[in-house]
């Protein structure tokens, strides 16, 4: 546990050692707030549905930006050789990094709390619904993070990690949208609809948290963190 | 466990490592005891770094076993890693962090906490001459200071087995002397493995040397044993004044001397003498004084570690 927390602290601090985290937070807040209020006054409804409908698309670019550096940089600078000869298990290192990236994402997402406050001042939004939407958004974000970390563990190049991260997440998101499932043969459609990231966010953006969606996101997180551990272990393969 | 086994810190047995069809390490077998500083010597590409990576559990061997303090590096890898301090080749560091932050992080992972951690970091600052750099960002330090940070990290938890892969690169002469003493001191009760291709460094620091070439051991022993083994022939340089022909003849007549070439250099004669293993210095001196030649110089040169190294690793 001390190991995970040591890695967590170090990773989390590292985000703020460079200006990237600050730029990131600012750009995120400006973009999402702007996009949301642009639609909000059109629809004229005191809820945050519009905001959470945007999130999967915003995360698509923001989350790989958080994770691209995590492993790629360690591989490039060779600090991985230090880290993996210290007395920590691969699982601990992966968990430490994942939790640190999640903490950063959570901070960014929660900073957007100004929006529900504004809405609360203007109208009478459903508080429970908004809490549900935030929890769902964090779950989905965590799944994106796990994917991004895994992609980063397979390259030494941050830019490659970013681009491939966006593409992989995008593909996983899109396969469950009607756009794709419509053209699939009927037996494959439900499968794709279940596996894809997109379908599970629909109810969440309405503020309805279904235990099946929670299970789904937790499985995605677990699966990609597992792949991440495997890809660290791949140095041991012949 | 027998008492002799207790003092064996590292045991490498029949170690092999292949990268595709590159056979980087071949049937390596050796032991290092407590209180030994082992110089691990070899030319570029000999397999030094690969061997160290296997010992530190970074990569597994293709075959063979490595035991640290009797524990297998595959079955017991976390326990083994706790006992090792490692300075990898090219000294990778977290460049964004300050020296102090970095050592704190390394210490926490090593299970150090609170006052103990602060004390150890403080000790390392003194030992590695880093006190003034504590709050500097590592990426902005000079190469030598980065090297010191790497060393501090490796020694932070006072490891039983310290593995240094080319630790002196980038250090200034003063720092080299300090670190050399430090390594010797650590070597008194702990075990140190020191990889390098700089022979003088290894000769000055290590009490045993292992020379590898192309992944296999080609020689091992103390620095003296190695040079003695290689100097099957040794030689003398003599600078005298006298008649050239008689110098040539008289010297050649001394038993034990196998060859003499005399050359004029100004008013002096320079004789290059080759001899067998036997020390003929005294006989040469007697010959010089009996003949009444004036003597300017008499020098013996035996094979240096450098010679041993080139002999063993060439061709
Ligand atoms: N990851 C790897 N993949 C393929 N080949 C490798 C790998 N690592 C090392 N080798 C090869 O193994 C051999 C030994 O390399 P190693 O780095 O152990 O040499 P070294 O003795 O440390 O050399 P140097 O003095 O230059 O540091 C070399 O031929 C090298 O090309
Ligand atoms: Mg090397």
Image (cartoon, coloured by chain):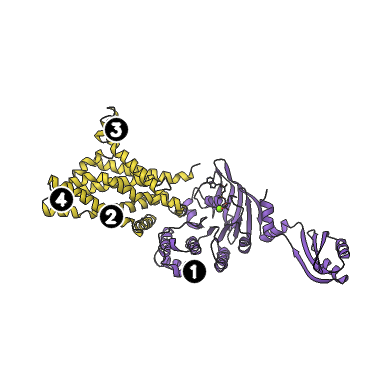
Chain colours: A yellow, B purple
The reply to whether label 3 and label 4 mark residues of one chain is yes
Q: What mark, if any, has residue A127 been given in the picture?
A: 4
**What residue did someone put label 1 on?**
B129
Kindly identify which residue carries mark 3. A191
Residue A115 screen position, x and y as percent: 18, 53
Q: Eyeballing the image, is B299 above or below A100?
A: below
Res B168 → quadrant: bottom right
Q: CA distance from mark 3 to mark 1?
A: 62 Å
Query: Is the Cβ of the residue at disc 2 closer than 8 Å to that at disc 4?
Result: no
Would you place residue A169 above or below residue A19 in this image? above
Q: Earlier in the sequence, mark 3 or mark 4?
A: 4
Residue assigned mark 2 = A25
Quote the CA–CA distance across marks 3 and 4.
Answer: 34 Å
Labels 2 and 3 within one chain = yes
Q: Kindly check if marks 3 and 4 are in contact, taking CB atoms under 8 A apart as contact.
A: no
What's the CA distance linking mark 2 and mark 1?
A: 39 Å
Foreground tag (2 vs 3): 2
Chain at tag 4? A
Asked if both marks, 1 and 4, belong to the same chain, the answer given is no
3 vs 1, front mark: 1
Foreground of the two, B208 or A181:
A181
User: Are circles 1 and 4 on residues that touch, CB within 8 Å?
Assistant: no
Per the image, label 2 sits on a secondary structure element best described as helix
């Amino acid at each position: 546990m001390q190991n995970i927390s040591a890695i967590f602290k170090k990773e989390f601090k590292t985000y703020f050692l460079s200006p990237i985290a600050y730029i990131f937070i600012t750009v995120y807040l400006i973009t999402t707030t702007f996009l949301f209020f642009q639609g909000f006054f059109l629809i004229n409804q005191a809820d945050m549905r519009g905001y959470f409908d945007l999130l999967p698309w915003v995360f698509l670019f923001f989350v790989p930006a958080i994770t691209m550096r995590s492993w790629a940089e360690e591989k490039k600078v060779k600090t991985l050789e230090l880290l993996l000869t210290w007395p920590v298990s691969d699982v601990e290192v992966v968990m430490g990094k994942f939790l640190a990236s999640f903490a950063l994402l959570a901070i960014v997402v929660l900073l957007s709390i100004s929006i529900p406050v504004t809405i609360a001042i203007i109208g009478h939004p459903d508080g429970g619904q908004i809490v549900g939407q935030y929890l769902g958004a964090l779950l989905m974000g965590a799944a994106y993070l796990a994917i991004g970390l895994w992609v980063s563990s397979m390259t030494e190049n941050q830019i490659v990690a970013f681009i491939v991260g966006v593409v992989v997440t995008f593909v996983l998101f899109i396969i469950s949208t009607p756009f794709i499932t419509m053209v699939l043969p009927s037996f494959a459609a439900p499968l794709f609809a279940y596996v894809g990231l997109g379908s599970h966010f629909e109810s969440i953006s309405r503020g309805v948290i279904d235990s099946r969606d929670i299970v789904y996101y937790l499985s995605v997180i677990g699966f990609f963190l597992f792949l991440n551990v495997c890809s660290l272990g791949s140095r041991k393969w012949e | 466990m027998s008492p002799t086994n207790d003092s064996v810190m590292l045991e490498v047995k029949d170690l092999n490592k292949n990268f595709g069809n590159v056979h980087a390490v071949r049937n390596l077998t050796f032991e290092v005891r407590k209180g030994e500083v082992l110089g691990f010597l070899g030319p570029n590409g000999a397999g030094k770094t690969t061997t160290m990576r296997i010992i530190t559990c970074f990569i597994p061997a293709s075959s063979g076993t490595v035991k640290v303090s009797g524990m297998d590096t595959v079955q017991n890898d976390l326990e083994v890693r706790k006992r090792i301090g490692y300075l990898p080749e090219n000294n990778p560091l977290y460049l964004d962090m300050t020296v102090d932050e970095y050592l704190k992080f390394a210490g926490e992972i090593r299970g150090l906490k609170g006052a103990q951690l602060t004390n150890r970091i403080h000790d390392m600052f003194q030992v590695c001459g880093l006190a003034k750099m504590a709050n500097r960002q590592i990426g902005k330090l000079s190469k030598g200071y980065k090297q010191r940070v790497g060393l501090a990290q490796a020694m932070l938890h006072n490891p039983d087995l310290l593995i240094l892969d080319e630790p002196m690169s980038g250090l200034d002469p003063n720092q080299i002397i300090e670190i050399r003493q430090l390594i010797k001191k650590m070597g008194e009760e702990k075990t140190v493995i020191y990889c390098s291709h700089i022979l003088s460094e290894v000769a000055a620091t290590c009490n045993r040397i292992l020379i590898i070439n192309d992944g296999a051991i080609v020689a091992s022993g103390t620095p003296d044993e190695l040079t003695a083994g290689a100097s099957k022939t040794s030689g003398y340089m003599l600078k005298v004044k006298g008649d050239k022909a008689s110098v040539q003849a008289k010297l050649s007549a001394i038993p034990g001397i196998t060859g003499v070439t005399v050359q004029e250099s100004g008013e002096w004669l320079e004789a290059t003498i080759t001899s067998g293993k036997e020390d003929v210095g005294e006989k040469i001196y007697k010959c010089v004084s009996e003949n009444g030649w004036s003597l300017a110089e008499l020098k013996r040169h035996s094979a240096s570690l450098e010679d041993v190294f080139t002999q063993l690793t060439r061709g």
